Image (tube, rainbow, N blue to C red):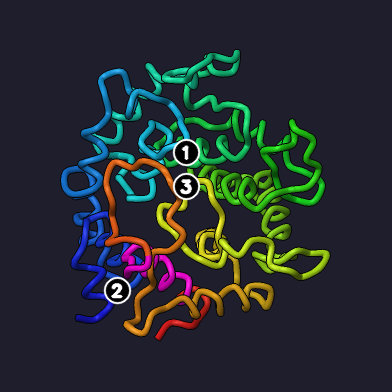
């Protein structure tokens, strides 16, 4: 079985993206496959787990991966059609009922915020913007807050309130993905595009994984690829963002692309690596170290963008 056939022999959440991005099926065929995310497989399973109070697992956010925040992120990454009846239903429940204090052991003042108003950390708020904008929620107020939190070096850092003065890749990638999704939702914004440009330069000046000062690898874990990535950064996620943003590959990403190519197995597939610990509703790959359809799809898209596809 070819790698493409193996990818297509999968869940609708993967199949429709393979059809769109790797085999260029007609738009109506892609749309028909995408519509199945709401009624079959992983997407339908996540949708069915939302309670009448809008919550997943009784929590707005937690350190595992079964809560409302992470369930919505999965549905976004699956590509659940925002116009579908199912998407509108789950998002309306979240808008009506969910606040950040739901399921939390204590309730700080910000925890009374409605879910799509965001909380205090830009790494979390970037993801909220991405999800809200994807599902048609007006995220302009939270975007304005994020723009005001951009640091002089071009990125963002969740630890500013604890004294951090320089950016982090983990926070920056979450904010950049959110700002890009917001731009798409509103049809563009010069201010947001400029902020994204500064954030992209922050990452590119460091070759997506090296310290600007010494050239050392910032974190070896960034050279392995997980899915879901959740709030964690890795080289493949950085390249995926640049591809999605329409950036042109330049010499500063060459080494990162070589790292992606080097993770490919002899069978032409990419493994699941660096699984982030935490409870999940279900597994989507065979296990750590085994071939991963998600990572293979993502890596092949990046290779195509970089002009290195077979």
- Res 55 quadrant in image: top left
Q: Is residue 249 left or right of residue 61?
A: right
- Give the mark, 2 or 1, whose residue is nearer the N terminus: 2
Q: Nearer the viewer, residue 179 or 83?
A: 179
What kind of element bears circle 3? loop
Specify the quadrant that holds the N terminus. Answer: bottom left
Picture coordinates of residue 179, whole percent (x, y): 58, 45
What SS does tag 2 mark? loop
Disc 3 and disc 1: Cα gap in Å? 18 Å
In what element is the residue under mark 1? helix
Q: Which image quadrant is residue 189 in?
A: top right
| Mark found first going from the N terminus, 3 or 2 | 2
Name the residue that disc number 1 marks: 133
> Which secondary structure dominates the residues rendered in magenta?
helix
- Where residue 24 sits: x, y (%)? 31, 71
Q: Nearer the viewer, mark 3 or mark 2?
A: 3
Residue 219 occupies quadrant: bottom right
Report the residue at 22% width, 56% height from top.
Answer: 12
The circle on residue 230 is 3
Q: Taking 102 as reference, is 141 left or right? A: right
Per the rendered image, the range of residues in magenta is 289-303
Q: Earlier in the sequence, mark 3 or mark 1?
A: 1
| Residue under numbered circle 2 | 23
Circle 1 Cα neighbour tier, 10 Å, few/some/many (<14 / 14–19 / ≥20): many
Residue drawn 53% across the image and 24% down it: 117
Q: Residues within 10 Å of mark 2 (few under 14, many from 20)?
A: few
């Amino acid at each position: 079985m070819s790698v493409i056939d193996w990818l297509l022999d999968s869940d609708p959440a993967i199949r429709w993206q393979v059809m769109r991005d790797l085999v260029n099926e007609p738009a109506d065929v892609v749309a028909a496959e995408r519509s199945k995310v709401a009624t079959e497989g992983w997407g339908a399973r996540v949708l069915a787990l939302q309670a009448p109070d809008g919550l997943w697992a009784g929590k707005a956010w937690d350190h595992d991966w079964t809560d409302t925040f992470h369930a919505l992120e999965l549905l976004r990454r699956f590509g659940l059609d925002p116009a579908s009846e199912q998407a509108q239903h789950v998002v309306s429940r979240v808008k009506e009922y969910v606040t950040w204090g739901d399921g939390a052991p204590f309730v700080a003042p910000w925890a009374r915020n409605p879910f799509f108003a965001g909380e205090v950390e830009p790494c979390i708020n970037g993801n909220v913007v991405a999800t809200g904008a994807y599902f048609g929620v007006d995220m302009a107020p939270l975007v304005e807050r994020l723009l005001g939190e951009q640091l002089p070096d071009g990125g963002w850092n969740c630890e500013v309130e604890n004294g951090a003065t320089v950016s982090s890749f983990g926070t920056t990638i979450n904010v950049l993905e959110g700002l890009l999704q917001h731009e798409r939702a509103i049809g563009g914004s010069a201010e947001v595009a400029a902020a994204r440009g500064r954030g992209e330069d922050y990452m590119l000046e460091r070759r997506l994984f090296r310290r600007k000062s010494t050239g050392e690898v910032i974190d070896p874990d960034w050279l392995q690829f997980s899915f879901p990535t959740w709030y964690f950064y890795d080289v493949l996620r950085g390249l995926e963002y640049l591809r999605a943003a329409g950036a042109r590959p330049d010499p500063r990403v060459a080494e990162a692309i070589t790292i992606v190519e080097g993770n490919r197995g002899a069978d032409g597939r990419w493994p699941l690596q660096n699984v982030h610990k935490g409870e999940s509703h279900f597994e989507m790959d065979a296990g750590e170290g085994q071939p991963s359809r998600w990572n293979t799809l993502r890596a092949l898209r990046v290779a195509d963008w970089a002009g290195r596809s077979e």
